Amino acid sequence: MKNNSHWLNWCRLCAKDDAKSNVKLQRSEQTCPQTWDNVLIGAIRKYFEVHMILEDEFSSVLCTECYTLISELIDFAEHVTKVQAIFEVKLKPICNWM
Ligand SMILES: [Zn+2]
């Protein structure tokens, strides 16, 4: 096995072994403003229950496909949250009637 295909360099979500384009997420303690890597790590924990916090022991690497997918998932989740707020406003008059 080549050095660059060590499992710590595999994508944490799909195990893709692409050392050239895989991205290592850097968790920082900074919470305001949040770094994008922290937002990604938070989303991965929320949606997949994968905890990418033990950087020294487990892979915190994503392939470009998963990186893009999670970024889109975050955008989509934000969109869904906004839509729910619209539905809540629309539902309120119905609830008051009952
Ligand atoms: Zn992947």
Image: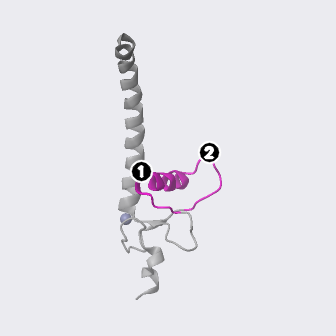
Say above or below: 83 vs 58.
Answer: above
Where residue 41 sits: x, y (%)?
50, 56
Secondary element at image label 1: helix
Few, some or many residues within 10 Å of mark 2 (<14, 14–19, 20+): few
Of the image marks 2 and 1, the number of the one nearer the N terminus:
2
Where residue 87 sits: x, y (%)?
36, 25
In the picture, the disc for residue 24 is none
At 36% across and 71% down in the image, what residue appears? 16
Task: Give left or right: position of 2 versus 37.
Answer: left
User: Magenta region: which residues?
Assistant: 26-52
Few, some or many residues within 10 Å of mark 1 (<14, 14–19, 20+): some
Quarter of the image containing the C terminus?
A: top left
Task: Tell me the amino acid under the disc marked 2.
Answer: Pro
86 or 66: nearer the viewer: 86
Task: Tell me the amino acid under the disc marked 1.
Answer: Ser
Q: Number of marks in the image?
A: 2
Where residue 71 sits: x, y (%)?
41, 51
In the picture, the disc for residue 33 is 2
Give the color scheme: rainbow, by chain, secondary structure or one colour: one colour
Say above or below: 38 vs 7.
Answer: above
The residue at the far bottom in this view is: 1
Secondary element at image label 2: loop
At 45% across and 81% down in the image, what residue appears? 6
Give the quadrant of ligand 1.
Answer: bottom left
In the picture, the disc for residue 71 is 1
Say above or below: 68 vs 59.
Answer: above
